[in-house]
């Protein structure tokens, strides 16, 4: 059963701003902004949280994109809740947005893992795009099994990491780590939208996947509200 009165989705962001000493990073703004816009247009309330709360570090901002400008102007993006303080029972879905920062703080953060587990086990949707699936690497259910075990997933690929020039910089290769947890990784062409849905887990490969991923989340939620 999904929550009763209001339809609400949480977007979860990284608080990590250092890409292995090579450059600054953070969350990838369009991967939060485009879903935020799509969810709100569909009538959902959207909250934003991050690992440490407050204003999270940004990467990839395009000032010519109205959705990104609107998102960064919103109070919820500038003063995020701390994931550790979030009441997961209020949400029908959680979306872990990407950005390289996630590779450092998502896998080991108890708030990241708890929120995903609680949303999923209440019948909600867990979604993650690009490097956002770093949240899924150590996300276990109450029985101790990995959420991704036996499930089909998309995530930023090893080849895309190589093309980005940071395959030797990131702490691990995301696709490989998910496969190690029992996931079935399904890569699409580099930089092209690739969204994989398996039960109530929705994953996307890269920034181009963020908007279509949000649409798939809405489709799943519509089925569950019906």
Image: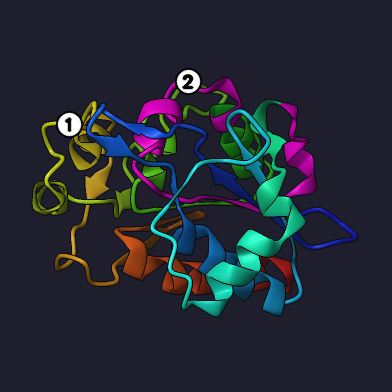
Point out the stretch of residues depicted in magenta: 85-112
**Residue at figure coordinates x 29%, y 58% from the top left:** 205
Q: Residue at x 68, y 63 (%)?
A: 73
Cα–Cα span, label 2 and label 1 = 30 Å
Question: Pointer 2 and pointer 1: residues touching (CB < 8 Å)?
Answer: no
Residue matched to label 1: 169
Q: Is residue 203 left or right of residue 35?
A: left
Front residue (pair 10, 93): 10
Q: Report the side of 199 relative to 185 (left or right).
A: right
- Identify the mark at residue 66; answer none if there is no mark: none
Q: Can residue 223 be seen in the rendering of this structure? A: no
In this rendered view, identify the residue nearer to me: 26 or 219.
26
First reached walking from the N terminus: tag 2 or tag 1 = 2
> Where is residue 117 drawn, in percent x and y?
58, 34
Mark toward the viewer: 2 or 1: 1
What x and y, as percent, mark residue 194? 29, 67
Q: Which residue is mark 2?
A: 144
Element assignment for label 2 = loop
In what quadrant of the picture does the C terminus appear? bottom right
- Magenta span contains residue 99: yes
Note whether 146 is above or below 77 in the view shown: above
Is residue 45 located in the magenta-colored stretch of the structure?
no
Residue nearest the viewer, comparing 168 with 212: 168
> Which residue is pictured at 66% across the width and 33% down the height?
53
Tag 1: Cα neighbours inside 10 Å, few (<14), some, or many (≥20)?
A: few
């Amino acid at each position: 059963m999904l929550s009763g009165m209001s339809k609400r989705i949480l977007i979860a962001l990284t608080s990590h701003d250092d890409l292995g000493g090579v450059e600054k990073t953070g969350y990838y703004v369009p991967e939060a902004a485009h879903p935020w816009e799509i969810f709100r247009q569909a009538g959902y309330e959207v909250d934003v949280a991050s690992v440490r709360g407050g204003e999270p570090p940004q990467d990839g901002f395009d000032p010519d994109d109205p959705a990104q400008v609107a998102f960064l102007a919103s109070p919820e993006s500038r003063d995020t809740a701390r994931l550790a303080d979030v009441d997961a029972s209020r949400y029908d879905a959680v979306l872990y947005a990407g950005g390289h920062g996630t590779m450092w703080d998502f896998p080991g953060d108890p708030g990241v893992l708890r929120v995903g587990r609680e949303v999923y086990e209440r019948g909600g949707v867990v979604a993650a795009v690009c490097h956002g699936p770093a949240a899924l690497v150590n996300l276990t259910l109450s029985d101790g099994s990995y959420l991704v075990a036996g499930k089909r997933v998309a995530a930023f690929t090893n080849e895309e990491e190589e093309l980005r020039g940071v395959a030797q910089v990131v702490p691990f290769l995301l696709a490989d780590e998910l496969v190690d947890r029992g996931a079935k990784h399904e890569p699409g062409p580099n930089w092209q939208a690739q969204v994989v849905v398996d039960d109530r887990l929705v994953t996307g490969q890269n920034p181009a996947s963020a908007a279509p991923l949000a649409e798939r989340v809405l489709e799943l939620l519509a089925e569950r509200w019906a």
